[in-house]
Image: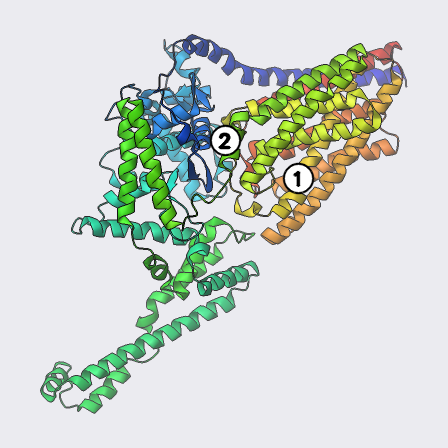
Amino acid sequence: MNDSTWTTRRAITLVLIAGNSILLLAMAYKVIEPYWYGLAVQTQTSSETRLELPEYDYSSWASWPVLEEGRIKPLQTVAIETVRKITGRASLDGQKAMPIFMSWLFYVPQQKDKNKIDWDNYPIILCEDHELRAAIYGVDKDDPQHAEKVHSKRISPNDLHKSVPFQRLVVAVNRKRDVDPDHYKQSLEPLERKAESVSDRFGYYQLITGSMELRNKAATERENRRLLADPVHYVALDKVPNSSWFSMGELRYITTTMRAPMLSPQENANMAWWDIMSQRVSLLPRLYLSEEVRKSLESFQQALKENQIEPVIRDLEAVFQKRADSQVAASRKSALEQLDKMSEADFTKFAASMGQANLTKQEMKKKITEMMPPESETTVAKDRVALKNLKQSIQNIRKPFIVGDERHNQMYMAYLEIKHPDMYLAAIKSQPFPETQAKQVLAAYDAVGNAYRSGNGSEFQNATLAFQKTLTEVSREFTQGNYPGENTTQLELTLNRVEPFKWAWISMLAAVILFALSLRLDNRTLYFAGFAPLLISLGFQIFAYYGRVMISGRPPVSNMFETVVFVASMGAVFALMLECYYRNTIIILAGSIVATLGMILADQLPYSRGFDAKIDPLVPVLRSNYWLIIHVMTIVASYAAGALAWAIGNISLVLYWFNSDRRDLLKNLSNLCYSAIKVAVLLLGVGTLLGGIWAAESWGRFWGWDPKETWALIALVVYLLPLHARYIGWVKDFGMAIASVVCFSAIVMSWYGVNFILGAGLHSYGMGDGGPWTIFLIGSINLMWVLLVCLKRINREMSGQELAA
């Protein structure tokens, strides 16, 4: 190759390095600047802030089963998840989650407890974006409190409540959500997106604490909505199996709401109970409906899925007509019976009032029959309106139609209300309001709150035992002794205590150090010693997966946190398998690096970055363990293979940077990258095909160019290019190392970018706030590294110093 060619390559590489350097510096400033200024503020205030909370015994509370977000879990898990959701971490100012959560539960601003913690004015809401904080406080750089207000990490609830700019941002978000609930996130401005996240944390704080200081006390309707939205459910008062438990907020709503002042408290409570039970029937009809009604619903859903609507409409019209005929016949029969019972004198008066004084009783009967024809339009008018509204709802269904989509529940119930008008009455009448039990539970709970605020540990413990005894007795009465109905509480407490993913990355990091030292020192003892922490790490990971599968009843690959740790685990497993075959320390070192980085990311990144470790029930579209195993786990395993190739490629580039003379090693590493990419392509191709089959089953179409589908295809094509180029000899060993690193960016975009950067598409169940600038920075640094290695290799080849590889 002549000198002009090398010079051209060098010039192109320098231009790319210069351009990437500018982007890297800009993104580095964007990522590092807030933390740089915030560090000083946090260092200054960290020594001054330490929460002082009651040192009560919370052990019985920690293990107590509660229902939250559709899953029975120990209260300790709820505490950890809630504190992490609101503050960004599972602890705050030296206090663990459980004491903080209990303080929130029994926080009453109007009744200061002995600790005098004013949570409404304490900085607890995670709000770390400095641009948003500047907008909330409305401060400029000349303000003496600028650094403290803008560069802090958390904000007090009252500061959010009083901030007019923040309220305007939230109103703007709500308006866009009302206009297009499915795609409004795509139209949000960056500041609106951040404000929405902070607003969610603020709202959850209000639900947990019931903070009345932050609301207009006259806004009774708003307070009622808050009570009904109380997320923590303690007691079973519903006799229907697998139904939701009741929260303290719901019980308080039932027993205190005055819907009609002229009614007695008992009648008001019955009306409130009716409201809640009606809502339960609407949200979970499969639990409450009779077999006949359930079959009607399934038939309707199947008709919608097959787009066979006309037979359904004709069936409803026939039902209307039959109902109308029955009502008219009953009215006619009643009127004729009343005529028969009339005396002659009464009939004469009745006929005169009707202007038919000359008619006999028999003639009047005939007249009444003619006045009440079977096809009376007035009789079916209400049904006609209901049918018209139902047709409109069907026309507004967003394609593809998903049977389990909860947004269709209102339409389902509208159909059933038309066809089976008595279904609510039948379901609710079977369960009258259990007033005595509800008041017992509320009284015991209020006693716990009073004891907590008293500061007396023994009084709090006694009230706790009494409350839990009441809960158990009442709940067992309504569940036929099957309370709480699950046996994974102790396993979940063990998971919380052990923190297996944290110890997994610590152990794996030890393996990385040992393998790296063994490679550097060529020491076989260190090499074999490295397998001990690696296997210990895999043991922690297996225990964590076992616990999550047993608790959730599904494969652990349904959100960003689970996919990251699964990629980390599979990266280590793939490397271990290849290591057993090739006996090359670099393979196991690369796999250990991938596993360590993945575990650290999942364990250390805060809630605000989308790495939420909660074990949540699946969204409707994912409720298939079969497809989760064969599609999602296949796709995620392909990411692990790509990540392993990325790590081996980077190690290869390190050797190229130092102009290693181990050409045999570089050749082996190139072959390993080639093999890992082949595995990634195979799994990615099969996984994408299986995803299309699942989409056809769930959404009624195989492919729809959804962003997730599109980027999965792009990633597959991107990885196919170096495979084919290698096969025909266009890409050699050095090119394979570069391809392994650069191609992984397509997986990152498909895996992370679609959810956290684009934030669009049917696969929205995995979305979160994310940290796009951080990802861009890391990607740019990696690309800069590749370009620098390329430049150094070109310089060496131009000077004749490069070893052939």
Q: What's the amino acid at mark 2?
A: Leu
The picture places residue 571, in percent across and down from the top left corner, at 70, 29
Question: Residue 493 got which mark?
Answer: 2
Which of 284/137 is in front?
284
The picture places residue 44, in percent across and down from the top left corner, at 42, 8
Which of 466/193 is in front?
466
Q: Can residue 213 be seen?
A: no
Indicate whether 497 appears above or below 341.
above
Question: Residue 633 got which mark?
Answer: 1
- Describe residue 216's horizontal placement relative to residue 477 as left or right: left
Indicate whether 764 appears above or below 613.
below
Cα separation between marks 2 and 1: 27 Å
| Quadrant of residue 541 within the rendered picture | top right
Question: Residue 314 got which mark?
Answer: none
Indicate whether 519 appears above or below 243.
above
The picture places residue 751, in percent across and down from the top left corner, at 63, 34
Indicate whether 409 appears above or below 182.
below
The picture places residue 141, in percent across and down from the top left corner, at 41, 12
Q: What's the amino acid at mark 1?
A: Met
- Describe residue 466's horizontal placement relative to residue 352 as left or right: right
For label 1, the crowd category at 10 Å Cα-Cα, with few meaning under 14, some 14 to 19 and many 20 or more, is many
Image quadrant in which the C terminus is located? top right
Image quadrant in which the N terminus is located? top right
| Quadrant of residue 600 within the rendered picture | top right
